[in-house]
Amino acid sequence: MNPFKYSDEQLSQREFMFAFPSVLIGVAILSLPSDVAKVTSFSDGWVSILLAGIIFTLLTILGLKLAALFPGKSFLTYTSFLISRPVAITISIILILLAIFTTAYSLRSVSFISQQYLFDQTPMEVLALAFLLVVIYAVSGSRAGIFRLNVLFLPIILLAFIFVVFFNIKWFEVNNLLPLFKSDISEYLHGIKNTFGAYGGFYLVLFYFTFINNPTKITRKIVFGMSIPIIFYIMIFFACIAVFGNAVTGNLTFPTIELAKRVDIPGAVLERIDALVFTIWIMAIFNTTTITLDIAVLLLTSIYKKVKKRIVVFILSPIVYYLSMFPQQINQVEVAGNFINIFHIFFTSLIIIGLFVIAKWRGVKNQGEK
Amino acid sequence: MRNNLIFFICFLSIMLSGCWDVINIEDRGFIIGSAIDLEDGTDDKKPEFKVTNQMVIPAGITSPTHGGGGNQKAFLNFTSKGRSVYRIDEEISALSSKTPFYEHLALLIISEDVAKIEHVFSNLLDTYIRDVNMRRGIKVIVSKGDAKKLLDFQPQEDKLPAIHIDQLLEHSSKQVGFLKPRRVGDIEEYHLRQVSYILPLLSVDENIEHKAGAIFHGLQDKMVGTFNEDEMQGFELMKTAAIEKVIDFTYKDHIFTLEVNNSKNKISVDPSNIDEIKITVDINIDGIIKESFGKIDVSNPSELKAIQKAVSEKVKSSIDHTIKKGQDELGADVFGIWQILETKHYDVWKKVRNDWEKGEYYYRKATFEVNVKTDIYSIGTSDKTD
């Protein structure tokens, strides 16, 4: 079973653009409406989702501008140039650890949730292993291949959830959405904080920019790519509030799953589409997990240039597996997951802003033109 | 090559072992209805329940074209008792040779006695909400008398009692404008928000009677009373846009029957004085006279006007009666006035919400004004019938 070799290891602009929604839409989509509804009144949570989305889109553009200053250079190369090699390596190692933890968290979540809803007899370890093996296979292959899989899966994922929302229209109650704009500022801010988990992954711009074959005029595409998850989240959020109301949405663990379970289409074949939605959701997690694991691999191979990529994957994956099975209770997973998510997002945001300021301060011109 | 072969064989041995969770469909016992009764002689502090689950026997459903087995019952009821529903369900699964499967559970029946004990109903419902295998679309009803009786009642037209009741509720709400079926998910919302609500109250005699309603008080978290058929009609005229509703009324000592073709209702709230919130209910009814027992010339305009007035008065008095019972006797805001306050007058609602159904009891202090307008646009094909 030799990995298939693509003729080019380059990404097109479109593949890069669709990586954002693919990576962003992940574990958090299931609980996002609940996390936001808990801290905001009525249907006001959409403001938080939108504001958080705008913040992260801006950060992504900033990261893009930073990476565009050094075309064809890897993350480690240009950070070493800006802030000396030892500091760059330290940052990279922290990022590698964070990527490993994030992958482990996704892995644990996907196996826990599918055990809860789909296979209640199968041990979680087996589910996690099966899922991880597929991820390993994807990551040890071609990098461009992962991105092309993203492009392939994304429409299916979006369609499945649009389908769920569409068939819930008959349960919509407009009264649940009213009154509008009754939350105060602190509630909105709290809501923004709770959406962070859903936007983790935007930082991939820092690592993959160098693989784009034609990186001109890409900003608009990035904005488009980032707006897909924002609109998608707002749609799901509104559907949950309209069907369940704010109080129930906030009280449910996974409102999005309940939304899928609420669908009942007459005729026996499609009466229960939740199983189908689950399968497709697992595809979304697959996208997220492969890219996060690949970030770890990419950074490691840029530090140790002599080590083969597949060796790195085979070293990392048992670690990921062990970490994912380490917490005993789901509460511990949640606490750890939240902490990793928030820390990851703050850390990467800080790096993007920090490096960008340093680059400007040192008056770095576009390095590609030298 | 040899390595690949070994790998392939290992791979096959994993894959061919099949699904870990497999349960063949023949081995599943589909539970379609559950009834919860109070065990005789238990006290309210530590109630003990009797749960009946209705399991489908597929052989009984299929039409006996090949002869034999035609008289087989299509369902089987298992009853067991205990303190927690989940525990009882586990015990019931030991009674049957099949694995109970709850995903197609359609109906949950709670007996009146269970519903009347404080907090018990919401605790019972927790099992049905929490379990990942149960759906939020399960319809919930209250039974007058034993809940089990409803599941034992073999209807003539359907083979499965639970499905019969399910269809009855669905049909009557769509065709006759009767109370929309309430589902587990809806009730969870009522409990979380601590608001009052109505559930259909069913009783079984020769047929299943399903026109009454059980009133639950949100804060007291128990069933506080009932609406009979007339009161429910007042409630439905006030709250739901009835599709086909029949109103009997008397005019000049004769009984008339009016079929409502279209009715519009609008409830508006004027909260300028919170100690006396004014609630105006405007109802417009369009209808056809279907039956008249009397020699009255209904084509005469002045007669028709008087008849319209008689209808309006009848509807008004029935709604007034319902409101009076709901407001004074039961003190439960089943009319959803809180929701109008919340969506349209949020600032006032913030002031009164903690004293809406308790303490200051602003709900009891509110005044209702009911205006009914009736239009009879058709009198059928004849003026007078002898």
Image: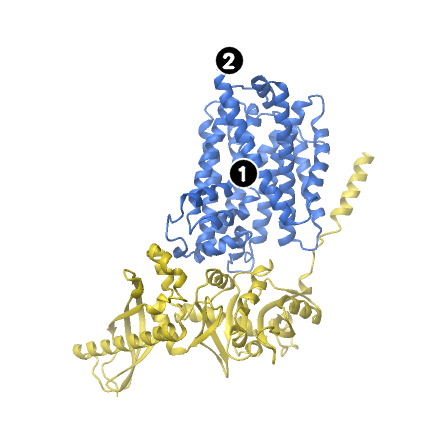
| Residue at the front extreme of this rendering | B359
The chain containing the residue under callout 1 comes to A
In the drawing, does residue B305 fall left or right of residue A352? Answer: left
- Front residue of this view, candidates B346 and A123: B346
Q: Residues within 10 Å of mark 1 (few under 14, many from 20)?
A: many
Which sits earlier in the primary sequence, circle 1 or circle 2? Answer: 1
Tell me the SS state at disc 1. helix
| Residue at mark 1 | A24
The chain containing the residue under callout 2 comes to A
- Residue type marked 1: Leu
Please tell me if label 1 and label 2 are on a single chain.
Answer: yes
Q: The yellow chain is which one?
A: B
Residue at 30%, 69% (x, y): give it: B368
| Residue at mark 2 | A369
Tell me the SS state at disc 2. helix
Task: Point out which mark residue A279 bears.
Answer: none
Residue B286 visible? The answer is: yes
**Residue A69, image x and y in percent?**
51, 19
- Residue type marked 2: Glu
**Residue A165, image x and y in percent?**
47, 51
Q: Quadrant of residue B4?
A: top right
Residue at 50%, 15% (x, y): give it: A362
In the drawing, does residue A67 fall left or right of residue B177? Answer: right
Q: The blue chain is which one?
A: A
The reply to whether callout 1 and callout 2 are in contact (CB within 8 Å) is: no
Q: How crowded is mark 2: few (under 14 residues within 10 Å), some or many (20 or more)?
A: few
Number of marks drawn = 2
Residue B242 visible? The answer is: no
**Residue B172, image x and y in percent?**
43, 71
**Residue A81, image x and y in percent?**
58, 17
The image quadrant where one finds the N terminus of chain A is top right
